Image (cartoon, helix red, strand yellow):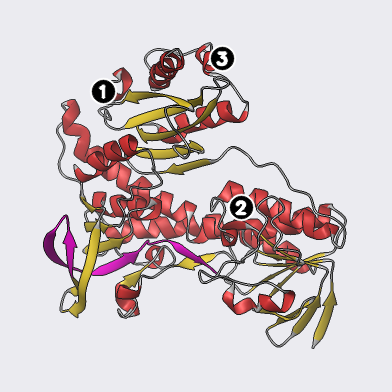
C-alpha cells in the first residue's frame, strides 16, 4: 500500500478538478488529482461538444427542409444515421484527446492517479486498494449523474438513454421519448427530431428550458410546439415494455394519451455524485437530496470542514466556464488551509440553450423582477427586420433594468442569435452599464442587434413612466 502526503487532494479530473489542481499548485501547494475514470471532462466526452456535434448535423438537415421558404426547391435530405453518429464520435474523441494529453502529463508528474476514492478519516483518502492519500484540504469535483424518475427506474437498461450513453449509439433510433423539457431535453430532442427520429418530449411544471419569464416562455413554447411534439405538463401513468419498445400511458391537459417509443432518453435533471465518498468522516452532513446541509457559495467550503465543492457537484452553476471558475476558487482556498478562506466574486450569470429558437438567461433573468423595482422592454422577433430576412422570425426577448439606478440587471431570450446577443447583454450587465449608456453604442443595419435596441428603447420608455 502506497502512502502519499499532499496539501490538497482533488477528487475528479474534469474541468473543475483540473482547474482546482492548477490553482492549488499556483498557490504553492502540493496538489494531487484522483479520478476513477474514464478520463476526459464531462464537456468533451458526454456534454457540450458531442451534443453540439449532433445539433450541427440536425441544423444542416433542417436547412435543406427550410430552403423551400426562400424559393429554393430541394429534395428531402436522406439521413445516414450511422454516418451522423460516426462524425459525432470521431470529433468527440478528438476533443477528449486534448484532455487525455493533459492528464497524461499530470500522471507523469505524479500529480494524478486513477482509482475510486473515499474518505477513511477526516484527512485521509483510500484510493481503491493501492494508495492512501493524506491531505490538508479536499476539493470534491465529482460531477453529477442523470436523475432517473422513479416511474422509469424499472425499465431495462437497453431501452434507456442519457447524455452519457446517447453518443455511443452506432445509429439513430427510430423513435425516442424524451423525459424532461429543460435545456438538455429540448436540445437533444429537437436535434433528434430534425434528424428524422420520431420524438415526443414530456416535461412537468410547464418548464421550457431555463426560462422563467412567462411571456418569453410562452413564445418559446409556441415555437417548439409548432415544430415537434412537446408536452410541458404531463403525468405518467402505466409504463410497460412492448414489442416495439417502451409503452407509456400518460395524461396531458386533461387528455389521456399513449405511445410507443424505441428508446427513452432521460433528461430530468442531475444528482450530485457524493454518496460513495463517505464525506461524513470529515463532518459533512448531506440532506435528502444528497447535497451538503452547510455550504458557502462564496468560498465553496462545506461548513467549517476541510472540504470544498467545485463544478456541477456544487449545484450552483452547472456550466463549463463556471466549473473552471469554481475549480480556481476551491483549489486556491483549499491551499490556504488551515488559514482563512476568501469569498471570490463571480462573473455575471450567463446560460445558453442551443435550440431553435435559441434560449438564454442573463444575470438574474426574471427572478425578482416586479413593476415597482424594474423596467422591462421587449422585442418580438416576429416583427424584426433581419429575423424576417432569415426566416427565423419567432420568439421574444425581454430586458430588465432596475428603476433605482437605470442599470441593466438581466434578460431572458428566445429567438434568433440568442447565444450571441446574450453575450452582449451579459457584458453590459457585468460592466454595470445603464440603459442610456448601452443605447449610445453603435447598432448597424440590418442586424439582429437592432432587436436589442428596440427592447432597450422600450426599457428606457418604461423608466420614464
Name the residue that disc number 1 marks: 388
Residue at figure coordinates x 21%, y 36% from the top left: 66
* Distance between mark 2 and mark 3 Cα atoms: 31 Å
Viewer-nearest of labels 2 and 3? 3
Q: Earlier in the sequence, mark 2 or mark 3?
A: 2
Name the residue that disc number 3 marks: 437
**Observer-nearest residue: 154 or 417?**
154
Which residue range is magenta in the image? 249-272
* Distance between mark 2 and mark 1 Cα atoms: 37 Å
Residue 252's quadrant in the figure? bottom left
Residue at figure coordinates x 51%, y 61% from the top left: 45
Residue 4, given in percent of the width and then of the height, sits at 83, 77
Name the residue that disc number 2 marks: 323
Count neighbours of disc 3 (C-alpha within 10 A) and say few if under 14, some if 14 to 19, many if 20 or more: few
- Local secondary structure at mark 2: helix
165 up-or-down from 299: above or below: below
- Local secondary structure at mark 3: helix
Q: Residue furthest left?
A: 256
Classify residue 254 as left or right of residue 433. left
**Observer-nearest residue: 311 or 174?**
311
Amino acid at each position: 500500500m502506497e502512502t502519499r502526503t499532499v496539501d490538497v487532494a482533488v477528487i475528479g479530473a474534469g474541468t473543475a478538478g483540473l482547474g482546482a489542481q492548477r490553482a492549488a499548485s499556483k498557490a504553492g501547494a502540493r496538489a494531487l488529482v484522483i479520478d476513477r475514470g474514464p478520463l476526459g471532462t464531462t464537456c468533451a466526452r458526454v456534454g457540450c461538444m458531442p451534443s453540439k456535434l449532433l445539433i450541427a448535423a440536425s441544423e444542416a438537415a433542417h436547412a435543406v427542409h427550410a430552403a423551400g421558404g426562400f424559393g429554393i426547391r430541394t429534395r428531402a435530405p436522406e439521413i445516414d444515421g450511422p454516418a451522423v453518429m460516426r462524425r459525432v464520435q470521431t470529433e468527440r474523441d478528438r476533443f477528449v484527446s486534448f484532455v487525455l494529453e493533459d492528464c497524461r502529463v499530470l500522471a507523469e508528474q505524479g500529480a494524478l492517479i486513477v482509482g475510486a476514492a473515499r474518505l477513511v478519516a477526516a484527512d485521509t483518502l483510500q484510493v481503491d486498494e493501492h494508495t492512501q492519500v493524506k491531505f490538508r484540504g479536499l476539493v470534491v469535483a465529482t460531477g453529477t449523474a442523470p436523475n432517473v424518475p422513479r416511474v422509469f427506474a424499472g425499465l431495462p437498461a437497453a431501452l434507456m438513454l442519457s447524455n452519457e450513453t446517447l453518443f455511443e449509439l452506432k445509429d439513430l433510433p427510430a423513435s425516442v421519448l424524451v423525459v424532461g423539457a429543460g435545456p438538455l431535453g429540448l436540445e437533444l430532442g429537437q436535434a433528434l427530431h430534425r434528424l428524422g427520429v420520431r420524438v415526443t418530449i414530456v416535461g412537468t411544471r410547464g418548464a421550457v428550458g431555463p426560462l422563467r419569464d412567462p411571456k418569453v416562455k410562452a413564445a418559446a413554447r409556441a415555437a417548439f410546439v409548432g415544430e415537434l411534439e412537446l408536452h410541458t405538463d404531463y403525468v405518467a401513468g402505466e409504463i410497460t415494455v412492448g414489442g416495439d419498445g417502451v409503452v407509456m400511458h400518460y395524461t396531458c391537459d386533461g387528455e389521456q394519451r399513449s405511445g410507443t417509443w424505441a428508446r427513452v432518453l432521460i433528461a430530468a435533471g442531475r444528482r450530485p455524485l457524493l454518496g460513495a465518498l463517505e464525506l461524513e468522516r470529515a463532518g459533512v452532513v448531506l440532506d435528502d437530496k444528497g447535497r451538503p446541509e452547510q455550504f458557502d457559495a462564496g468560498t465553496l467550503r462545506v461548513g467549517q470542514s476541510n472540504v470544498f465543492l467545485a463544478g456541477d457537484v456544487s449545484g450552483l452553476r452547472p456550466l463549463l466556464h463556471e466549473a473552471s471558475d469554481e475549480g480556481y476558487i476551491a483549489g486556491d482556498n483549499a491551499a490556504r488551509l488551515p488559514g482563512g478562506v476568501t469569498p471570490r466574486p463571480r462573473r455575471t450569470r450567463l446560460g445558453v440553450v442551443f435550440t431553435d429558437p435559441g434560449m438564454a438567461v442573463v444575470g438574474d433573468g426574471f427572478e425578482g423582477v416586479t413593476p415597482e423595482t424594474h423596467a422591462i422592454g421587449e422585442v418580438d422577433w416576429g416583427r424584426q427586420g433581419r429575423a424576417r430576412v432569415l426566416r427565423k422570425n419567432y420568439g421574444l426577448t425581454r430586458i430588465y433594468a432596475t428603476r433605482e439606478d437605470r442599470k441593466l440587471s438581466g434578460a431572458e431570450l428566445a429567438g434568433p442569435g440568442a447565444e450571441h446577443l446574450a453575450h452582449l447583454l451579459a457584458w453590459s450587465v457585468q460592466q454595470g452599464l445603464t440603459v442610456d449608456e448601452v443605447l449610445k453604442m453603435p447598432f448597424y443595419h440590418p442586424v439582429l442587434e437592432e432587436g436589442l435596441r428596440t427592447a432597450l428603447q422600450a426599457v428606457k420608455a418604461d423608466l420614464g413612466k
